[in-house]
Image: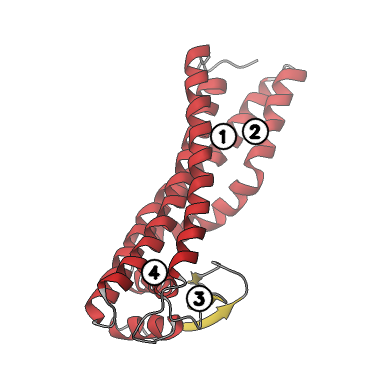
Amino acid sequence: MINYNADMILYFALILALIFSIWAQLKVKTTFSKYSAVSTRAGRTAAEVAEMILKSEGVFGVRVERVRGSLTDHFDPRTNTLRLSESVYSSTTAAAVGVAAHEAGHAIQHARGYFPIKVRSAMVPAVSFASKFCWIIIIAGILTMSLLESSIGYYVMLFGIGLFAVATLFELVTLPCEFDASKRAMHALGTSGWYSREELRGSRAVLTSAALTYVAALAVSALQLIRLVLRYLGNGRRR
C-alpha cells in the first residue's frame, strides 16, 4: 500500500498540475484575445487560409464550415469537415489564422495517414466509454470492497482503473498529434509569404498556449492514475 510520504508527494504534485491546468486554460484565452486584436495585412479570412493550405498540400474534399461557440474549432474526420468557431471563421487576425492553420494541419494528418492520428481515431470509441464511466466504476469497486468486504470489488475497481488508464493513454497519444498539427500550420503560414514575422509570432503564441492545455491535461491524468495504482493496487491485496 502507498506510504504516507509518497501519497503526500503525489497529492502535492497533483495540486500543482491542477493549478498548471487552470493557468494553461487562462493563458490560451488571454493569448487568443491578445492576438485577436492583431489584424494581418494579407486580409485573408481564417476560412480562406484553411482552404488555401489544404489546396497547397493537395488535400481536397474537405469542407470548411462555421460552428457556434468560441474556440470550438476542430476537424471531424468522420465527415471530412473542418469546423471553425464564430470568433475564427471570418476573422483575419493572427490568432484566427493560426487556429485555422492548425485545424488544417489535422486534416492533412488524416489525409496523409499520420500514424499517431490513426491510433487516436481508433481509440475514440473506447475512450468515449472510458471517460464517462471510469470514475463510477472505480468508486463502485471501492465501496464494494469497503462495505461488503468482497473480492469482487477489487476486480470492479481494477476494471475502472484500467478504463482510466485508457483515457490517460488517449491524452498521451493526443500530444504528438497536436504538436505536429501546429508544426504543419506554422510551416504553411511561414512559407506562404503572406505574413510578417510579428503576425507569425502571434499565431505561434496562440498555438503554443493551446498546446500547454494538452500537456496540463496529461499531467493531471497521469498523476491521478499513478496515485490510484499505488493506493489501491500497489500491494495487490484483495479483500
Residue 226 position (above or below residue 77): above
Marks 2/4: CA–CA distance? 36 Å
**Front one among 39 and 156:** 39
Amino acid found under the numbered disc labelled 2: Ile
Marks 3/2: CA–CA distance? 40 Å
Tell me if I can see residue 88 in this picture: yes
Marks 3/4: CA–CA distance? 12 Å
Q: Position of residue 235 (x, y in %)?
A: 51, 15
Specify the farthest residue to the right: 147
Q: Position of residue 96 (x, y in %)?
A: 45, 74
The residue at which mark 4 appears reads as 102
Which residue occupies 53% across, 12% down?
4
The residue at which mark 1 appears reads as 161
Residue 7 located left or right of residue 68: left
Marks 1/4: CA–CA distance? 33 Å
- Tell us which disc is closer to us: 2 or 4: 4
The residue at which mark 3 appears reads as 88
Q: Position of residue 226 (x, y in %)?
A: 48, 29
Q: Total of numbered circles in the picture?
A: 4
